[in-house]
Image (cartoon, helix red, strand yellow):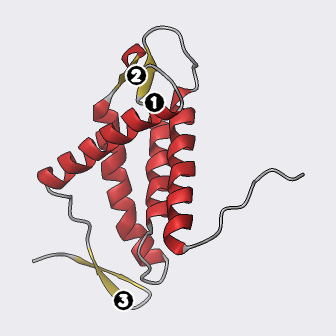
Amino acid sequence: MQKLHEHNDVLYPSYAEMSDEKHIERLMLAKSMFEKSFQEIKLDITKHYIEFHLVSDAIARTDQRKLHYLMYHDGMMMNELKQIAVFSFWILRLKPIHRLAGGPIDVNEQVVLNWFFRAVISYRNKKGIPQKSILVS
């Protein structure tokens, strides 16, 4: 029987780890995200090493945060922007990308910024929010 937690008179199921299949699926998605970001920021991915056990940890921690968000935000689910923000937090914290030769030392930050800006643009397009220039004339 699944254990329940009470918060503000509401019962929530305890966290259940995602299946291995789902975890591998998310790990492959993260790999694709890394590859696309490296292309977009014009860095040679072959000159970097990505510790995927740390990426795997970031995926698990992001998944765990979904239940916390549900409990402490009145039953709201995390949208894709919040999920990418939490995942980005863990990538910045764990720093899984390392330089093998040359290149910028802040590559983790560059990749995360690329993800976030891409996610914001995608969200705006889905919601029909017009694009406005960030620059002030």
Q: Calculate the distance from the C-alpha at mark 1 to the C-alpha at mark 3.
A: 44 Å
Could you say which quadrant of the image residue 35 lies in?
top left
Circle nearer the N terminus (1, 3): 3
Q: Residue furthest bottom?
A: 9
Residues under numbered marks 1 and 3 in contact, where contact means CB atoms less than 8 Å apart: no
Q: Amino acid at mark 2?
A: Ile
Is residue 136 found left or right of 36 in the rendered image?
Answer: right
Q: Which mark is residue 107?
A: none
Neighbours of disc 3 within 10 Å: few (<14), some (14-19), many (20+): few
Q: Is residue 96 above or below residue 90?
A: above
Q: Position of residue 20 (x, y in %)?
A: 13, 50
Q: Which mark is residue 45?
A: 2
Q: Position of residue 86 (x, y in %)?
A: 47, 54
Q: Residue under circle 1?
A: 38
Q: Residue under circle 3?
A: 10
Residues under numbered marks 2 and 3 in contact, where contact means CB atoms less than 8 Å apart: no
Q: Calculate the distance from the C-alpha at mark 1 to the C-alpha at mark 2.
A: 6 Å
Camera sees residue 92: yes
Is residue 83 found left or right of 121 in the rendered image?
Answer: left
Q: Amino acid at mark 1?
A: Phe
Which mark is in front, 1 or 3? 1
